[in-house]
Amino acid sequence: MSFVVATDVGGTCTDTVIVEGGKSLVIGKALSTPPDFAGGVMDSIRSAADAMQVDVKTVFDRATLFIHGSTVVDNTLIERKGARTGLITTAGFEDTLLVTRGAYGRWAGLSEEGLKHPVATDRPVPLVPFDLVRGVAERVDYKGAIVRELDEAQVEQAVDYLVDEKQVESIAVALLWSFSNPVHEQRIRSIIKARDDGIHVSISSEVAPAPGEYERTSTTVINAYAGQMVNNYISNLQKLLDERGYRGPVLVMQGYGGLLPAERAAERAVNMLECGPVAGVIGSKFLGDNMGDKDIIAADMGGTTFKVGIIQNGEIEYAREPLIDRFHYSVPKIDVASIGAGGGSLITLEEDTSAPQVGPQSAGANPGPVCYGLGGTQPTVTDVLLLLGYIDPRRFLNGTMPLDVPTTEQVFREKIAAPLGLSVEDAAIGIFRVANAQITDLIHKITVEQGLDPRDFVLHAFGGSCPMLASAFARELRVKRIIVPYTASVNCAFGLARADVMHDYSTAMTIPVPCPAAEVNAIYEPMLKEARETLKEEGFSDDKMSFKWSVGFRYALQVHELITPVRADTPLDGNGMERLINDFEALYENRYGKGSAYRDAGIEMTQFRLSAFGRVERSGFSATSPGDTDPGLALTGQRRVFVDGRDSLIETNVYDFEKLRPGNIIAGPAVIHTPITTIVIQDNQQGQMDGYKNIVIEAT
Amino acid sequence: MRLSQTLDLDGTSIVCGHCGHGLCDKDVNWKEKAILNETPMRTLGDPYSTDEQVLLRVFSCPNCGALLDTETAMKDDPFLHDKIFT
Amino acid sequence: MIDPITFSIIRHRLFRVVDEAVITLKNVSGSAITNEGHDLMVSLYRADGSLLMGGVGFLHHLTSAAEACKSIIRRFRGDIHEGDVFLLNDPYTAALHTSDVYLVAPIHFKKELVAWSACFVHVYDIGATNPGGFCPDAENIYTEGFSSPGLRLVEKGEVNRAIMDTFLNMVRSPDMVALDLNSMIACNNVARKRMRSLIEKYGIETVDETCKTLITQSGEKLRARLRELPDGQWQSRQYLSVKDEIARVELTMTKRNDTLVFDFTGSSEQSRHAINCTKWASLGGLFAPLFPLLCYDITWNEGVIKPITMIAPPGTIVNCNRPAPVSVATVGAIQSVNNAACITIGKMLSASEKYASEATAVWHANHFAVFLFGQNQHHKQAIGILTETFAGAGGARTWADGIEVGGEIPNPISRMANIETIEYTFPIRYLFRRRLKDSGGPGRYRGGVGMELSFVPHDAPDGGMHYVVSGKGAKFPMSDGLAGGYPGSPNAYIWIKNNESKTADGHSHPIRLDAMSGEKQAVDWGVFPLMGNDALYVRWNGGGGYGDPLLRPDEEVCRDVEHGLVSPEFAENVYGVAIDDKTGRLDKKLTDKKRTDLLARRKRKNGGGHAAVTNP
Ligand SMILES: [Zn+2]
């Protein structure tokens, strides 16, 4: 049988999922090995091969598809390891990037504390310093009409200056209104390439063809800055696979939620930002589709952050004003919100009030939590989870890392419990509640903010720590139920294995409604043509292609638009057009409440989006039919753990995940140990293992 | 004890924070004892192109020349008076 | 006594309530001033109208909206119901000016009034003499549009159509104003919903106790901080000019033990122009910088208001008598109060070893309220502020330069619109928008620079537009420096008449002021045309500097010159740093000589010691 191999390189771990056609799915995990990620990739694949009891060679021999996600672009930016980058822009507007729409770039991404303290704030150091910015005379207007021709002599001078004098390795080109008329940007690229083909060039009309010159410029600069790095990364990856004898396609995850062939991905560094967590949301959607859930909160808690994505009515939400390391960018990207609350987040007490704080600082993997015994001296969330009895000190990481409970207790008492005037147990319970409250607030923010009610949602709990907290915070959110997926610990890699090739196209144009369907169809025609050609080039036959339309709407006069998926058959007819408009109105009312729409102003369409999919062939994996409900065989004993709503730790049943069978029902309170995490079931809840080994937790 | 970033209080006297030169008693406006350079703001250059009557007052230490304070002022407006109570 | 954990959770959640309400405001509103400029505010109040949780946004509204709640409570006593929303925008009752409309709403829990939410946006239009709300032609409050000391716009959840329609009947672009009101109703709805679920979860007693404690705690924290600072008295003065009138805002701030008194005695009599402010506006004006400068780590609530006293003599520009016009207040005398308070607080902080790092010179001291109006290229009526006024400029700190185009203190989350957004909405074309050389106040640490911009009509069906400019104070640099730092440069507004828009090489798109032909006229007060070949040029102020410019390291001045933030002439004249014409590098020898010379001249009275251009 053939294998699909999906590998996700994260900041801490490199995860692998191997799907063997028709059979089950295998998980591999290893530490990432920056800056050369190859080691981690191979270790992780080896770990999965071990689990399948085959050797690595067999994996490569039988692999028919290799899918990859990586944090390489995020790291390049955060560590400032990108290329020396110059910027060519419209003369008179050289400062657009540095000025960041005024204070916007200073305060965007700050916490409440930062926002309230302007004297202590500043912008991040720009990726392109001012002396590497050059304006060239040219001007295009809002319609795309050329007001002033491009002064090519000035372009030559600018390139001379940047390349000869300043030795840049990469150039971003971002001109006003270039998305309406890209000829000047294209011409500048030709001039640079004619002069030195080795320079990387990113032009804004290709990287981020959308209105808003600051965000478009910033996006293009990020792309240029990380472009060469991603190029090298991907060609190294291809070389590695080649050496191992793999000859099949290599697909790379994109932040908008689809895959691109590696060669194309190399040109779009900025699209790889946060692609791992995005793949996690895709994995969630796949699970939801399988289980019949359309509204999902996908929550992932790793070592340093807590991340959430939202799937509503089977559609994944896109981010409105995405940021990376406080830099704005504006390519379509699936929204993943995050706060600095992970297992390694430090617990501190506020100076004057002793109010406890969780994060955002993190102990990282080294020294890590106090309980690791690697020198950590400040308590973390993981330490609290240990003190609450959720983590079995002898079974941590499958028993490979014994945890030091006495020291943890002592440090926690000294630094947190005593200053609060509480016992260790009571203080740990308190911190647990603070962490849960922060998480609840984040989820509220990204749901309620969009007019969504968490009570309509199912919560997927991923990552090393989330299955321990989810049963408590999900109760406050009053979600319908909690799913701890079998793949919880390698969720992003799992998502990679389920993603399809996808190209995103969009056309910005303002058209008031009502308007004839033909007018909209005409806008889509050229995009469809291009999409078909591209997918064909990539080897997809017509029957493997599918297309999804969505249209940005707003009430005329409003600023924010709402992307509304086209549910009718395309191309549209009159009825389909009507249905689309009705869908928009319903969506709007649902989000912003009754009475918030102002219909008298009229409705207009502002953006036409096309998602073109190439379906990647792979067989599914099958479910086991559920058996007996009695989990007795998996019961390994009892331990004192914290049960939410009780005042102290109580004796609670402990189960072994590996011994549970589909169909088993576990009554709360209880904990289930998996090789990587613990699943906690609270009072008045029960958990059942389904046919895919997911644990489904519901209120009783 | 400091009076500001540029001035100190030495007992009951205000002194230059740079050289320690005594200016005056703490209850007096030290600006009376500093050297005043008062010129139209516009002499700074283009973006300061304003009326002749808008002045930049520069107060400095008579001993070391350290810049002690500045004021934007119209000709006859009194000096601003900052003081620390002790 | 609430345990610290529950306390911490409720405190953060109160901030989130405000945050979510702000997002609703933006999502529903249609105007650039709200969405692009963030000229907005949402906050929560106790049942008696005292401030419970101030959100970020324009901070001078936090105390005024508290007064709005209190005044609604007095006016409607016994007649306040669940689901009501009240409108108030009379500046003599509580508001800052008529166009910043407050919508305040009671929050009930189990039929009992437990809190208030309040928000404002600068509405698209308020029906004043001039479009957009800032009204240079106003002679009194009666010409400044609709104003109400309090009316019930929403009754038990139902909009009162008669009132709504009457209001909309009195304004230009009623569609846009309706959208503004809708956004504020939705915002209050969200605040109420979230506040109630908070109470449901923790119980009214716990939430109430937490709120009380929060207020006590904020008061105690601020008082403790004040006690750490030296007792003393600090003064500042701001000049405001309109046409030939020059007004002064005089401030003496006195700190004794744990109290602060802001005394505006000596400020000018109220103006006949609309730059005046009422006492509520002045109070808000001094709190706007006080919150972020003294309470950056303290919850913004009633507790920090208590230790502060304001003295503002009636009949003056900081406490005008009805019917004095006030529509330009928020960018007029209020801003002068902001600046004056920023500097006196900065002087007090810098007198303390511990807190000197929190002191700052004035940021972006002078808003330029330019409202464009007319028919746009899509054949719709458009009114809108140039949101560049929200881009700002940072004042120098005692340890670092001001942030270039870095915003302002009274609104920590301001920003400006993209040119592509503006050019799509208005029939204009920008010629340039860039950082303004030499605008940052000189000092050991330089003030952040402002910007300059210019635009011409483009595709305008009527051949152009008109604009209202309330550019008071253009005569004066208002971003004061600190500890000897010089002020940032002042604003300027220039009408270039019948500019042929031709550059030397024949292209019709000049990108510098000096490349533009046509008669240039300064315009700073009133309504002016931008028709045919006219151009408008605007430059805005830099932030104030900190410390002695002669002590700024020469390599930093050199870098400023290299980055186009300081001209070589300015570097030489003000900083005493000489740049070699040919190499563009520092001329160390000449610099040493220049600096020694400037220092020597400074020791002579009126020796031209601040600038080499004034020869003794
Ligand atoms: Zn001295």
Image (spheres, coloured by chain):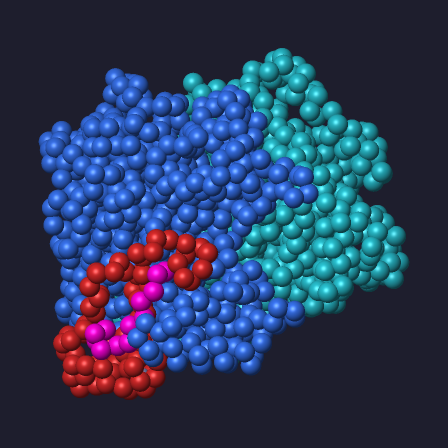
Is residue A582 on the magenta stretch?
Answer: no
- Side of A699 where C220 appears, left or right: left
Q: Nearest the camera: A121 or A472?
A: A121
Q: In which quarter of the image is the C terminus of chain A?
A: top left
Q: Where is residue C553 in the image (x, y as percent from the top left)?
A: 49, 76
- Residue A303, horizontal then vertical, whole percent: 54, 63
Q: Is residue C55 visible?
A: no
Q: Give the range drawn in magenta.
A: B30-41
Nearest the viewer among A16 and C525 is C525
Q: Is residue C603 left or right of residue C272?
A: right
Colour that chain C carries in the picture? blue
Q: Colour of chain B?
A: red
Determine the residue positioned at 27% across, 19% down.
C166
Q: In which quarter of the image is residue A142?
A: top right
> Where on the image, by quarter, is ligand 1?
bottom left
Q: Is residue C386 visible?
A: yes
Residue B31 forms part of the magenta stretch:
yes
| Chain A: colour as depicted | cyan
Residue at 29 percent across and 40 percent down: it is: C328
Instruction: Please give the name of the residue rendered at 40% of the width and 49% of the height, measured from the top-left corner.
Output: C491
- Left or right for A68, reference A537: left
Which residue occupies 27% across, 53% down?
C239
Q: In this view, does C561 lie above or below C387?
A: below
**Quarter assignment of residue C487:** bottom left
